[in-house]
Amino acid sequence: MRRLAGQKLVVATHNAGKLEEIRAMLAPFGVEVTSAGELGLDEPDETEDSFLGNALIKARAACATTGLPVLADDSGITVDGLNGAPGVYTADWAETPDGRDFVQAMTRTWDELEAAGAAEPRTAQFRCTLVLMWPDGHHEVFEGIAPGRLVWPMRGAQGHGYDPMFVPDGHDVTYAEMPPEEKNRISHRADAFRKLEAALA
């Protein structure tokens, strides 16, 4: 693992909340963090059919523009009864002419499971792939997984995305019924970032 201490790092995101979370996590390692959003970079088209492929697209685009090391991620949910769908198309399933509607996406997911006659428990995994890339193309990959099962009807008012229908393994409540700090402790993103932190340490 290459050292990052004393370097400036670009996080390939336009999400201010995600940036602050990553900035706080990397503070102990002496890394100065900025983001694609703060630098006014365009968001590249995500044209790959894997989380790793799309994370690499974002990392390469930001590296080429800034000449700095970049941290990029891609994430989504894979449903076993739907052969891994929606996967990299998780956000696409929520798209409407008026923005993203994850109630629509969750309803479609459950309807397709019903149509397929999928057996219970209807297992699924939240997945996160992190790519840490340097301008010369060298990169490290860290993958996080949160396994669980899907339930219906939706439950809870916390969280976002598919949280109201996802019960993580070892629990009997959905992500949307958990305090945010509990969900963030066991999430796919937390799993990936623990692996990144271990490598940096």
Image: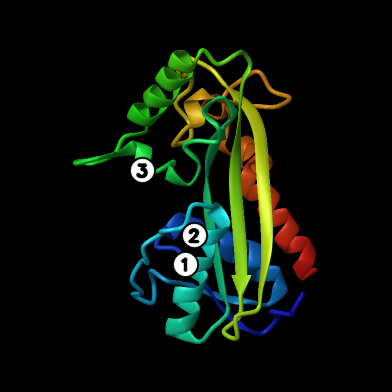
Disc 2 element? helix
In this view, the residue in front, 192 or 53, is 53
Inter-mark Cα distance, 1 to 3:
17 Å
Mark 1 to mark 2 CA distance (whole Å)? 6 Å
Residues 80 and 175: in front is: 80
Q: Which residue is mark 1?
A: 58
Residue type of the residue flagged with mark 2 = Asn
Q: Which mark is residue 179?
A: none
Res. 91 in view:
yes
Which residue in the structure is indicated by mark 2? 54
Query: Secondary structure beneath disc 1?
Result: helix
Amino acid type for the residue under numbered disc 3: Asp
Number of residues whose C-alpha sits closer than 10 Å to that of mark 1, classed few (under 14), some (14–19) or many (20 or more): many
> What's under tag 1, amino acid-wise?
Lys
The residue under label 3 is: 92
Report helix, strand or loop for mark 3.
Answer: helix
